[in-house]
Amino acid sequence: MESRDRKSLVAAARGDATPDIVVHNVMLYNVLTATIETVDIGIVGTRIAFVVPAGNGSQGIKVIDGRDLFAVPGFIDGHVHNESSMVTPAQWAKILLVHGTTTVFTDPHEIGNVLGLPGIRYMLEASCGLPLRYFITAPCCVPAVPSVETAGAVITYAEMQDLLQWDRIVAVAEAMDFPGLIYQKGNITPIVEVAHRMGIGIEGHAPGIVGRMLQAYLAATGPSGSDHESSNADEMLEKVRAGMMVYANSSTYVNETAEIAAAIKQVGDTRFFGLCTDDIMPQDLLEYGHMDYGIRRLIANGVSPMTAYQMATINVAMHYRMPGLGAIAPGWIADIVLLRDINEVKVDTVMTNGQIVVEQGRLVCEIVEPIEPLTANSIWIPEISDQDFLKFGGNSGEIKYNGIDFSSNFTRTTIKAMNRDGMICLPLPTGVSIAAIVPRHSQGTRPSLVLINGYKLEEGAIASTVSHDSHNLAVIGKNPHDMLVATLELASVGGGLTAVKNGKVLATVPLPIAGLMSAATVEEVASQQKAFEEQLPELGLPRALPAELMVFALSVVPDVRLTDRGLVDVASQQFIPLIV
């Protein structure tokens, strides 16, 4: 803040100058003291000049009548992947601001796994100058587990030294290779040491890690760590007691608000509890909202409104050591949300940096793309044929294969099928499908294959280049030709999701930015997503996003996954032979 601006701010605070904006007679949810006060709030430039008892504030150039409204700080998302909403930062900001989110700490892990440092640089440039406060945590697991998968790039300690000096990169992103940190091996350990030398925090990812393993993990990451993967109250309590920030993860895939509510009841100080959204798909963003949805969930599960708003604001700001962010007080940044209903989180007005960006629940500022979207095709697959989806190896006759049970949380199973000269015979056994990961990062290798059961696919094929975390091309099908058609469809449009039946493409969601995002609006992508989902019953699937398709390659979440290099036991990080 320049000195002349500071002088104007201080003059308005004294009452000797006219503020730019004054909100009169508003009910302040003071997250610093956990008290509720009726106040006048004055704003000069990007900062709050005064917060005084109602009736004591001066008139402003613009006056807002705050009667029947509640003032809370702008919401801060502690951990989120922009790419999961499938749009650029500019398009994303248009929706987030309307829902009261003014700051995000986003992990561009997905585009980093596809394009490496240029992808991360794109996200920084594409978010430059937006009214949404956009910070980045530097992806440290690219690929997530190098020993078992291939991504489109590799980030080592050398790249991390470079990354952590870039503007708006404020921490190391979720350290998903928890075995590497616990046992001090692999790429992750030297990466974390770079952050320690630079005095930069390391965000965590420790599903189910408790006891001495948690002690080791936190000894490796140090203070300022976090976790958004805890699944029960006992685990959350153990982590908070050990000094770890625990986020209520309120996303498309996860709702941990009930468990975190149970944990909160058992502590006297809630400063180490936060809120994040992690992954929210376009349709859910439009239908349910963003951080406001998570706050509603917390309150519905018995968390006091004050605690919920602290979790969504000051707790996250303090975790990231962002002074001036996350509360409404003199000298603090003027990121303010005015609500019509505190429990339902109904947003009326949003200010970021002292500028009104939302009025009466509608965006009132223009948001344009800071740079051209990065739409060069990133799908590089080898020449393949139908036969590549049948090559399982083995002798002729009935063979017992190691497979994945989709109905039981990706557990290991055995499946019997007929084989002829190393090729699976069709038709497949009842209830069985073929799942494949097609390498799309110029690996030049053939698709890796596995048989699956417990998936409701009855015919055709579905495919996606949104395939966490390395984002190779994932395809599940009942016959090899439809699997091939689906693969080639995504290669032709630059990535996305598609459904195929009898050799015909039923619907496609094109995501030409790294195979993960679109330059279209959230509304347009959500409409494409809905049209895609409406075709899924034609294949025997429910009319819903096929989440299993997008995560069956996720090599950091138990039990068994398929990567471009084969079938993986996640706990041991060892390959499983395809034939029993």
Image: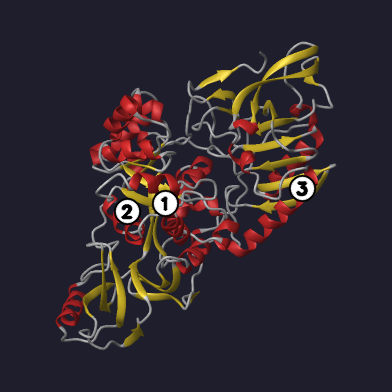
Are dots 2 and 1 in contact, CB under 8 Å? yes
Kindly report the distance in space between the C-alpha atoms of the residues bearing marks 2 and 1.
9 Å
Horizontal side of residue 490 vs 323, given as left or right: right
Label annotation for residue 537: 3
Quick one: 326 or 190, which is closer to the camera? 326
Label annotation for residue 276: 1
Quick one: 152 or 65, which is closer to the camera? 65
Query: What's under tag 1, amino acid-wise?
Result: Cys
Q: Is residue 457 above or below residue 364?
A: above
Q: Secondary structure at mark 1?
A: strand
| Residue 228 image point, x, y percent | 41, 43
Residue at image position (28%, 45%) is: 267
| Residue 515 image point, x, y percent | 60, 47
The residue singled out by tag 2 in the image is 316
Q: Secondary structure at mark 2?
A: helix
User: Tag 1 or tag 2, which sits nearer the N-term?
Assistant: 1
| Residue 501 image point, x, y percent | 82, 43
Residue at image position (42%, 55%) is: 298
Kindly report the distance in space between the C-alpha atoms of the residues bearing marks 1 and 3.
32 Å
Q: Is residue 321 above or below residue 467?
A: below
Q: Quadrant of residue 18?
A: bottom left
Whether residue 171 is visible: no
Q: Is residue 26 above or below residue 89?
A: below
